Amino acid sequence: MAFLTITAADGREKERVVTLDPAAETTVGRSPECRVVLNDGKVSRSHLRITWKDGAFWAADAGSTFGTLFNGAALTAPARLAPNDRLACGGYVLAYSEAAPAASAPAPAAPKRPAAEPEPEIAMDPALAALAVLYTDEMMAMKKRIHEQVLFKLNLPEIATKQIQDDEMRAKLEVALDQVLREVRHELPRDLANDLFRQTLLDELVGYGPITPMLRDPSVDEVMVNGPGRIFVERKGRLLETGARFFDDRHLITIIQRVVEPLGRHVDEASPMVDARLPDGSRVNAIIPPLALDGSSVTIRKFSKKKLTTDDLIAFGSMTPEIALFLEEAVRARQNIVVSGGTGSGKTTLLNVLSQFIPRGERLVTIEDSAELKLSHRNIVRLEARPANIEGRGRVAIRDLVINALRMRPDRIVVGECRGPEALDMLQAMNTGHDGSLTTAHANTPRDVLARLENMVMMAGFELPSAAIREQISSAINLIVQQNRLPDGSRKIVQISEVTGREGATILLQDIFVFEQKGFGPDGKVLGNMVATGNIPQFVEELKAKGDLRLDMGVFVPKA
């Protein structure tokens, strides 16, 4: 057996021991996804890899920013480990041995959540517990029968979307429903909440079925339907099961049609996928069989009606006041900023907040696939892409809108999300007088953003050499703000990096701020804080030289 004894040079952590497994790679870095997590600003998210090869363990640097020392010398090539070898990553020393240290027993490297009672794979949503009684097999059968009787009284085979929109028809439906409920009242459980039951039935007839209460609930961020019998919600960053369900897949498809038809969209076997935006701004995606194998699927991303501010994000713990002021200075200094993160990490919310820092005297053009940005500027033009119609015509892509925006005399361009060939036009705009532009991109790290942008530029169809593409990226992008959703469901800025130029084929990055995770609290919340790396971005130095800096330079000093 082989072991790593991990010691923090400043004594801030207890010594810990990790057992090396020949069958699995041991990853070392700042990311919570690494097997060995080192909370240090000079440790990269993925810093070091230890693998088994040719009957021995080998250590290799994973392209870290500050490098790895092997027995006091820079680790530039994979090194075979022997007893008493030492690796240094940031402020940590990793000592290799092939006998378990007597002073301590092997322990897991990554911080673990405190012990708690076992819970289901996905917990049930307590906020919807009162509805559970309405979705038993008996109650579902009763609701379906009532549903059919209401339609029979109105001499309707089914309710069309256009009929629901008619106030007179809705009134007739409510009268017919009340009549049927009086007829079957002796069959209903005595302890049934009659008002709730009636509302549920009405939702089935004229609303969006069982997902209607979830759409009304402001604390629900996302509704996910995986077939007629499985409905989930995301509430405060947590994925929860609801227990609600549709009658069958036909009922679910009817509700999907009810959602998308007023928006001028249609879904059927010939066109089994649809993207749409509800009047309140919520984003809807639906896909039906034969593409969806286990029944139709619907995903509805809701957006807060309240326009969030920096104070809100600070209160949520997404950023600190110092980080907020830094980002405000960056926007004021017309830095081109990319907000990076995964799905549901809060990229659009952060982009909204950053846009609020743009001076009111500037002309702003926003370009989105589905309009989600809520800006209060007076001199603003909002553009939204358009999908093709049923005949496959009329599509207007984001790239077309970016090209058109350049003819609209914008001071800044805000692209809701770069995910295709529009990246080339966006980079060219940033390089040709539209400094201070903002966009988002899907990526796990700032370094990944650069690779993603390069791939997206290649999608434009031009045979540009990689060197030319990287030159465009390095000269266009100034800052990358990494936003992640952490294991406890919270959304935080975890890294801010500056693009400093290009050296050969490599675009150079330097971290300005990084989030140091320090484990979990008793309530399961992630503990940690943003720390400065000591690097000062170029725009700060320029503002300081002009005497126009509102930021305390002390924020860039690493805290001991």
Image (tube, grey):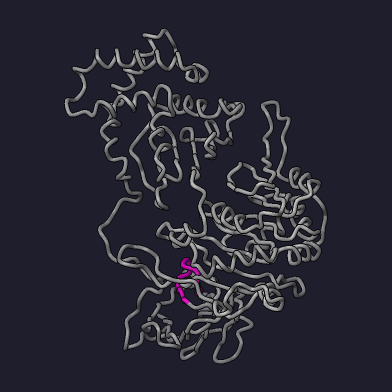
Q: Is any part of residue 21 visible from this angle?
A: yes
Q: Which residues are magenta?
A: 28-39
Taking the magenta stretch, the answer to whether it contains residue 225 is no
Instruction: From this view, report whether residue 124 is shown above or below residue 327.
Output: above
Q: Is 339 on the left or on the right of 208, as rendered?
A: right
Quadrant containing the N terminus in the rendered view: bottom left
Q: Is any part of residue 52 visible from this angle?
A: no
Residue located 35% across and 76% down the image: 107
Residue located 48% across and 59% down the image: 311
Query: Which of the pair 105/241 is nearer the observer?
Result: 241
x then y, percent, for residue 512: 59, 74
Q: Is 370 on the left or on the right of 437, as rendered?
A: left
x then y, percent, for residue 316: 43, 59
Magenta portion: prevailing SS class: loop
Residue located 24% across and 14% down the image: 182
Instruction: From this view, report whether residue 331 is shown above or below residue 559.
Output: above
Taking the magenta stretch, the answer to whether it contains residue 31 is yes
